[in-house]
Image (cartoon, rainbow, N blue to C red):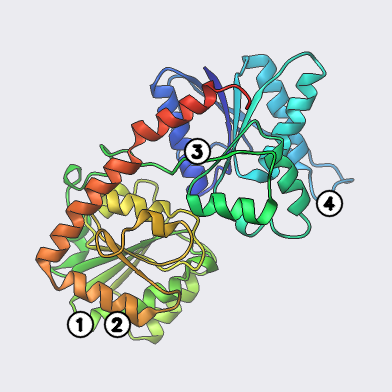
Amino acid sequence: MKIGITCYPTYGGSGVVATELGIALADKGHEVHFITYQQPFRLPMFLPRVFFHEVDVGRYPLFEYPPYDLALAVRMHEVVINEGLDVLHVHYAIPHATSAWIAKEMLRDQGRDIKVITTLHGTDITIVGQDRSFHAITKFSIERSDQVTAVSSFLKDETVRAFGCAAARVDVIGNFVDPTVYDRSAHPPLLREQLAKGRKILMHISNFRPVKRVLDVVHIFDRVRKEIPSVLVMVGDGPDRQSAEEEARALGIEHDEIHFLGKIDAVAPLLASADLFLLPTDRESFGLSALEALACGVPSLAYDVGGIVEVIKHGVTGALCPVGDIDGMAAAAVAILSDDARWHTMSAAATADTRARYAKDQVVAQYEQLYSKGRE
């Protein structure tokens, strides 16, 4: 098949999943065309059967805010015609599903048709879509999609609750990991050799937005380090990084105890050295970074909200605490890190569970099946 994929190409879970899906589809013999405003950051410069089509947003004095959604619709229309696409798979409801519907209508007038699949990832439903300014167009765009998927049962339920969407069936297809990449034994312990010095490694990976509560990460670690010799590795960047660094200094956390590594594309080698993963977000529709950690055999701790409770099995592969329960998170971390037998049991369970439910091949096969379905 010839598949068009549109996503946000910048650092973030939805863009990672969309890009990795496209690469996996190309590996299976499909032709994949990414249509977005810049090359996705997880996409190498060249791969067989993978193509990139840039959306050019004109800069005219008339437009204070250039209409990306319209430029995207036009580019989708062009690529469908020129490349003979069978499917447009868009990630995030707005503006991508809206643009795909416009392109579909333009094609219909020319006697052509294109199947539109919309994958919902989180804030497009839980935050942006429920804003009064966008609610109606989000609902419309979902209902006009030929197929709709959500990355968790939580997100499916939230979509139905917030928008009704009686005219749309929402299938749950989770995010995925490649077990050959996220494999603890596949990577040398370079991070451990360089930073740990015999201490435990706690890790957090995110875009450092307020929803990720990176200050909670720092406070959890501050409690843990007083009980167990440990270091904290913070991967990523964003608006709250400076605040986290300042909070670490205020708490007297030494430079050799906390390390801010910035944005790093290949996180599997880092996770392979971690002992515990922290994801204390207050809204999480899935939790891709936690899934990647679990795949590497890293027990993971999170707040018990949203779709993350479907990814982490409390007491089996990690622990879940109420939002804001920093003391509870720290106590759970200490309990796991201080008991080697318990840690090894959790680590093995995390790897096994991830491969059983979220391995790349089985999830990609679900999307292939969806692409082949007719409109229901």
Residue 352 horizontal/vertical position (percent): 22, 46
Q: Earlier in the sequence, mark 2 or mark 4?
A: 4
Mark carried by residue 18: 3
In percent of the image, x 51 and y 70: which residue is there? 240
Residue hosting label 1? 227
Amino acid type shown at disc 4: Glu
Identify the element where label 3 is drawn.
Answer: helix
Residue 194 horizontal/vertical position (percent): 19, 61
Q: Earlier in the sequence, mark 4 or mark 3?
A: 3
Apparent side of residue 268 relative to residue 374 in the rendered image (left or right): left
Q: Earlier in the sequence, mark 2 or mark 3?
A: 3
**Image quarter hosting the C terminus:** top right
Identify the element where label 2 is drawn.
Answer: helix
Amino acid type shown at disc 2: Arg
Marks 2,1: beta carbons within 8 A: yes
Pick out the residue farthest to the left.
341
Q: Earlier in the sequence, mark 1 or mark 4?
A: 4
176 and 372: which is toward the camera: 372
What's the distance in space between the residues labelled 3 and 1, CA to CA? Answer: 40 Å
Res 65 visible = yes
Residue hosting label 4? 64
Residue hosting label 2? 223
Residue 167 horizontal/vertical position (percent): 69, 39
